[in-house]
Image (cartoon, rainbow, N blue to C red):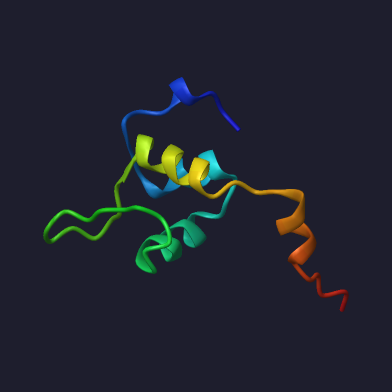
Amino acid sequence: MAATDDYPPILDAAQVAELLGMNVQMVRRYAREQRLPAYKLPGGRTFKFFRDEIYDFLKAHPVTADAEEDVEVDQN
């Protein structure tokens, strides 16, 4: 993960994906499903994200060892 000063105050989906270590399509999907705080300008097609809101979201949803144990992995 890159340093927090490396990102501008307003991010696009690719920057959020890089920050979170996710696929860009997944970031867009989470934005559409309102699982990530995101905004679209009127008539716009792309999502914009406020860097500080993404940081607040991460702080509010920490990943713990217990959460990782709950995930089932398909071995097929």
Q: Is residue 48 above or below residue 69?
A: above
Q: Quadrant of the C terminus?
A: bottom right
Q: Is residue 5 left or right of residue 76?
A: left
Question: Residue 23 falls in which quadrant of the image?
Answer: bottom right
Q: Quadrant of the N terminus?
A: top right
Q: Nearer the viewer, residue 67 or 47?
A: 67
Number of marks in the rendered image: 0
The residue furthest left is 42
Q: Residue at x 75, y 55 (%)?
A: 66
Locate residue 22, reporting x and y percent.
Answer: 57, 51
Locate residue 42, reporting x and y percent.
Answer: 11, 58
Q: Is residue 59 left or right of residue 43?
A: right
Q: Is residue 70 above or below residue 57?
A: below
Locate residue 53, reporting x and y percent.
Answer: 36, 41
Locate residue 35, reporting x and y percent.
Answer: 43, 62
Q: Is residue 56 above or below residue 36?
A: above
